[in-house]
Structures are given as structure tokens and as C-alpha cells.
Image: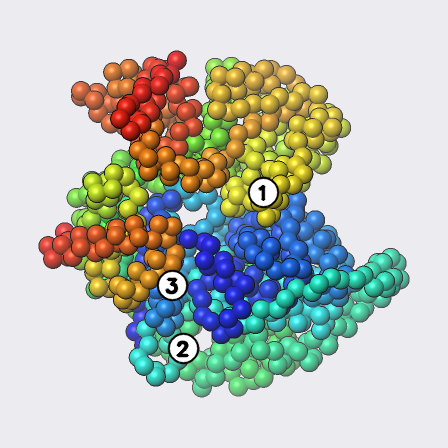
Amino acid sequence: MEVPRIKELISREKGKKVVMLGNEAMARGALEAGIGFASTYPGTPASEVGDSIAEIAQDLPGLTFQYSTNEYVALENAIGASWAGVRSLCTMKMVGMNVAADPLFTLAYSGVVGGLVVINGGDPSASSSTNEQDNRYYGLHARIPVVEPSSTQESKDFVVESFNISEKYDVPVIVNSTARACHAVGVVELGELKDPPKEGYFKKNWAKYYNAQVLTVMNHQKLIGNQNKMIQEYAPVTKLNKILPGDSKTGIITSGMSYDYTLEALNSLGIHDVPILKLGLVYPLSPKQITDFASNLDQVVIMEELDPFLEGEVKKIAYDQGLEIPIRGKELFPSAGELNTDIAMQAYAKAFDKVPPINMDELNLKVFGAAVILPMRTPAMCPGCPHRATYYAIKKAVEGKGYDVVWSNDIGCYAMGALPPFQMGDLMTCMSAGESIASGMSYKTKKQKTVAFIGDSTFLHTGIPGLLNAVWNDADLLLVIMDNRWTAMTGHQPTPATGINWSGKKAKSVNLRDIVTSLGVDYVRMADPFNVKNTIAIFEEALKKTGVRVVISQQECLLETRRRNRAAIEERKEKGVRQYIDVNEDACIFCEECIKEFGCPAMTVTEFEGEKVSHIDMSRCVECMVCKHLCKGCAISVTKVYPGKTILEEKSK
Amino acid sequence: MRKVNVYICGVGGQGTMTLGLLLKQAGVLENMVVTGTESRGASQREGAVDSHVRFAVFEPDEEFDERKSIHSPLIPTRQADLYLSMELAETLRNIKYVSEDGTIVMNRYEIWPPTVRTGEAQYPTIEQVLENVKKFNKNVYVVNANKLSEEKYGDYSGVNMIFLGVAMATGKIPVKIKTIEKIIREQMWKPEKSIEQFRFGLEEGKKILAAGPA
């Protein structure tokens, strides 16, 4: 499904209309801007920007791509390429910006040579994040322009323009795209593809690049000067902003997805004459443009997602310019959660004194009444997920021992260990925080055992300093590295331990055990979670010890294994070779170990001779065989079917 | 300009995203303005997922009016002309999207969430689901695409294309059948097999439609 769409990314058919994901459109924009370098650490909702560049980078000679170990490393690499004179792109999710913030602020002082654009995927509603932070404040804080698209077409076009601004005003530019814009699928008219530069050259300029004492202050002054110039000459006339004129005395200022919701809500309310200032450049604003827009108005309504950022900026301008009209923003719209057309309709109905076409309170009550019979459906680890097997093993190792355990969890698929049936997630904060929070806690919770889970990619992202610190400062911590060989949750990007690079070519790989050992951890154990009994024994022993202990539970994500073997699996099927994992109904004692304790989604319940028995849904089973090892009634058997013969291979023991 | 909204829901892994993408691409081939969104990220397997597909269909030489067109990738409440659910109980989760004169196509296939498997929650009966769905819209058609696929192909490999065929049979999707087939040919892994499954779904869909709402 993905491949033909990805090829459009490097299409040279200017003017062609294609369907693109917002993230793909931003990647295309960077390619039309002629980038020579792109780096990323994957994170939903921005992952596909980097992933799509990874797909085509080999086809554009001169384009260098990398999955970096984390966001600050990604940004620093992009800075290097920019300073060598090459346009550079760096992409991350919004919380990644906190990691990249250290180089970002000083980068703003030094500025760029080749344009540098940082794409941030924001997450109002926190569907894949641990907070909803509003990254427009990074623009305000670091004096960096912030650009926000409203459609997939703009996602492409605005990235191209951001590279131009970056070079013209010697400053990096943030493209702030929310999850809804990143994952919107729309039509994009392609522009001209620009080939990457052949190579770059670092032209020395000590005053620009060496931020120390007076040079720092001078660079800060330069940044302020460039920003003022931008506010004066660019912000009032930029094509990133547009005005829909109208005669109404109430005007609307909005940006991003809120512009879309605004237009559709007003249309539904039958309001067609409201002037709208749609901002694509959300920072810095032009006092002239705001004043001109508001000068004939009695009231301004500002619709924006998350914090009152534009509201604050517009109010500052209004104070300076003596605009004495009501400016209404968060008085009408919520700051938490994602907005939509329904919310916009209710708020605008209030602002314009109209009756909304739908009584949302009444409807919500009706929906609630109808959905009462609907069972809750949370995401779960996939059938065959090695993390489920690891959680099962440690749960069994703890069972009946009387331990009081604090389960510190982290960012990744394994975070779902907090859900039933394991409920092993007492806390989750940010990338690799789990191990250090648990270490800090361990000094003060002598009666409790502190166990932290961390994924392989999260560990390599920022987890190494935390573990080193725990060893150096003698914490009492059992760290479980959930090593599934991939950055799985964001779409199976490789890690430095996978053994391949972004293009799928063989690359140097680090050995996690060697890293852990070199940090000074004396107690390191390797576990194969699909070997249930051994893994339980390893955890039993590790839990008894004190000090810093590390168990690396290693088994590849089965989705990836199966994807790699897809052709072979299909071929087997075509030839009539099949494998069935069955529950032998006579032997099943319906202890529900596989259902309630292990919780595999392929395990269901059926009836046999009037008795309830476990049943395996073979349309979902991926043959990890863990259930066979944990079955108390030895009821699970494997049957192989070849054309013409059937072989009952083995039963669980 | 005519706006047509198609809402697709199901459980992660069922293929709602693929169906949504096929429809969007078909719309573009027919020169419509198309937008929409998909559930991505945060390991959506087993979770409730959806795909929004929105078409703006223009008359020849009609001028584009920004204020009146579609923009948001999300379908507003009560504006889905076609509401497609690939899983029985999921039909109810976002039923607020279906418009009063829209059509619902529901796949009679159950994927039990963990709470049902462990016995903490009950999975509703089809009668219960239908009764509640009908509070919003009585134009409901039921198909068992999984059963149809299993009977004809021996496994569930045909579910998506059969379901797409049934959806097309409602006549609510504003693209031509041959455009859908063109997209299937370009995009699917096994194009010929997919087209055959799609046509089978189309025929089954015609029968279901002819029999009237459930």
C-alpha cells in the first residue's frame, strides 16, 4: 500500500495532484526546497516525515538521511550540515523538542548558512504522548519563527517557504504541525523537485559559531535585529498569512487546524460575512497586520488549539497600539484537549448569538445511553508480542513472594504493561525517566522493590546516563531492558542495536549487554521471553538481589519478523502448507491462565460438550508458542498440514 | 458543490486505513477535493480505530468558494452520509457521526476486547447493537464479510475488498466502480485477486441492499 505513494515524493511531474499524508507532504516540501540533509528521532505524530525520506533518500544522490539516537543529536547533526552550507531538515515529535532545546537556543544566536527547518509534531488530545505541550512557545522563548499549516497542500508549501525565511533571516524555523495535520490525508499539487547539492563546505567565521562571552551577546543582538527586520518587512506581507474579507464587525484570528474548523462551523451556522485573518506565520506577528485587520472591528475572536498563545501575542499588540476592543479567546474555547468543528460551532454560536444546529448536550446524552452496552476497548500488545511474555514472566516471578513492587514504566509499546492483565505501570513520565525516577525512589523506599522497564530504543535514546548514574550512586534498582530490536511503536525504525541503518543496509550494531557491563553493572542477565520457565527463573533470582541489576529480555518484535518473512509465509500458504496451534478440548481444564493471566488477544473462549474451553483464533495467532509453554493442562498442540498428509507435531509439556 | 462524508471504523489491524486511502485516491482521480484522516501511532492494534473520508464534488466549471468547501479532516457530528463499521460492537462507538438520512453498513464480526475475554465485560448481542444503532438511523445493512471470505477463500484475506464492494453497492460513495478498480489495480499487493474479491462483495452488497434494511 505504501510504496507507490512514497514514489510520488520524488515525482518530477510538476503540477501533478497526488494524495498525501500531511507528514509526507512536509517531506515533499523539504525535497522541493532542495535539502541535502535530514535527521530525525521517530515519534508519533511526526514519524512518517523521516520515514518517507528514508524510503527515497537512496534515489536522490547528495541527500544524506539518518535516524539519530535522540533529538538533540538529530538537531546537532542538522546544524553541522547547515553550517556546511546545505539545507537541512530535522523532525521530531513535540516532546522531542525538550530534548533538542539545548542546541536550539544557541543555534538561534549563531544562525544558519543552509536553511534549517525543524518540524514538530504536536499532540493536542495526547493520543500518543505524555503531555499536550504547546511548542509555539519555543518560538517565543528562543526568538525563532513558527509556521503552522492548515491543509496537506500547505504542509508542503509552508515547508518550502520556511527554508527561504530561514536563510533570509539567518535563523532556524519551526514548522509546528499538530497530529491532526500530520495525519490528515489530502490532495497536494506537486511543485518542482530540486536536486540536493553535491557537497558543502564549512566557511570559518569564529564570531558566528563560537558563542562565548561578548560574542554571545553580540549574536543575541544580531538575532533580535534579524527578528525586528522580519517583523517589519516580512510578517505584514507574507503569503503564509491570508485574509478572508467580510463586513461583519466581529473578526476572527486563527491558524492551523482551527482555521478549518472555523470555516466549516461558520458555514453550518450560516455566517458568511466574518472577516478572518488566517495566520500561517504564528510567530512573530506583525503589529501592523493585526492593527489594520482589527481597526474597523468591534470585537476579535481568536480560535487556537491548546494554550492562549496567539491570544497573548495579539493582546500585547493591542495594548501597544491602543486597540480598545474585546479580544476573546480561551473564554470561548478550551485549552486542554483537541478542538474540532463541533466545539467551534458551539463557541461561535455563543460569540455570534446564534442557535447551533445540533444540541450537543442532548446528543451526547443520547450517545452515552446507546453506547452503555459497548465494552471498553483499549489498545493492547499484539498477539505474539515479546513484551507480553516478559511481563508474564516477571509477574509469575513475583507471585506469592510477598514483595511490594513499584513498577516504573517508560515510553514505547511496553507502556501497555500498565493495562490489564499485568497492571505493571505505576508511573510513566518521559523518554528514559522511568529508570532514574525509580533509582531516586529506591533510596527512600527500602520496604519496596523498585523495578523499571525500558525499551531498547528508549535506553539508547537517553537511558545510558541514567543507568550510569544509578551504578555510580549505588541505587537499588532492577532494570528490565525490553529489547525487541526495533523502535516498534513509531513504525519499526531501526535502532543502533538492530544491525541495519535507515536504508536497510547492514550497519555497525552495538551490543546492549556490552554497554550495560561497561557502565559498571555487575549483575546482567540475558533472557529469551519466549522461553517462559527460564525467564521466570531469571527474574526470581534478580528480584532477590540488591543493587543495580539489569535483565535484558530479548526477542524480536514478531510483526517485524513476519513482515520480513511475508513472501515465504504466503508461498507456504499457496502450496497448502499450514500450521495450526490448537487447544485440545479434552485436556483443557479452563484454568484461564492463557486468557486471564497471559492475556493473548488470539485466545478466546468456546464451548465443548457443554463446558467452557480456551480456543485459539488462528486468524490472529502468530505462532509465538508461549501459550504452549504456560498451559497448565498441556492442552496445546501444533499440527502441520502438508498437501496430502497431516502431522500432529507435539503437545505442550 | 456537493459534500459527501464516509466514516469507517473498526479495530486496529482490520484495515480501516487501507479502505480510507483507496477511497481518497479514487476521489482524486475523479477531480474531487478530498480530505480525511486516519488513526495512526500509539500501537493501535486491538484498539478502536477510524478513518474519515470527505469528498467535495464539483459541478463542471463551478467556482471554488473557500467559505463553503470542506476543510477539516474530521467529519463533523451527524454529517456522515455513509457509516461503515468493520466490527459489530464498534458500530456504536462513534454513531454520533452518522447523518439522519445516511446509510450504515455493519460487518457482523466480533473482536472481543480483553475485558470481554476475561469475563469482566459482556459483548453485546447483534439485537442489542441494532436496537441502539437504530436510535440514530434506521437505514442499517448487515454483512458478514469475514464469513463470506472464509467460505469463498478459506481465510479472512478477502474481508477488506468484500466489505468495500458492499459499501460501493450502497451507491453512497461518489466515485465510479471502475475508478475504484483502477486504484485497487495500482495499490494492492495482489491486484487481480483483490478485484475479484471486490466484485464478489459488490454482488453480495446488491443482494443485501435489495433485501432492505436490517
Residue type pointed to by label 1: Pro
Task: Give SS at disc 1.
Answer: strand
State the residue position of label 1. Answer: A494
The residue identified by callout 2 is B67
User: Is residue A199 placed above or below A550 in the rendered structure?
Assistant: below
- Residue A251 vs A347, above or below: the answer is below
Report the colour scheme: rainbow
Q: CA distance from mark 1 to mark 3?
A: 30 Å
Q: How many marks?
A: 3
Foreground: disc 2 or disc 3: 3
Amino acid marked by disc 3: Gln
Horizontal relation, residue A400 to residue B69: left or right: right
Secondary element under disc 2, as helix, strand or loop, is: helix
> Viewed as shown, does residue B152 lie left or right of A145?
left
Q: Amino acid at mark 2?
A: Arg
x then y, percent, for residue A263: 42, 73
**In the foreground, A546 or A85:** A85
Please name the residue that numbered disc 3 is placed on.
Answer: B25
Q: Are marks 1 and 3 in contact (CB under 8 Å)?
A: no
Q: Chain of mark 2?
A: B
- Residue B171, percent across and down? 22, 64
What is the x, y in percent for residue A40? 62, 52
What is the spatial separation of the Cα atoms under label 2 and label 1, in whole angstroms?
Answer: 44 Å
As helix, strand or loop, the secondary structure at mark 3 comes to helix
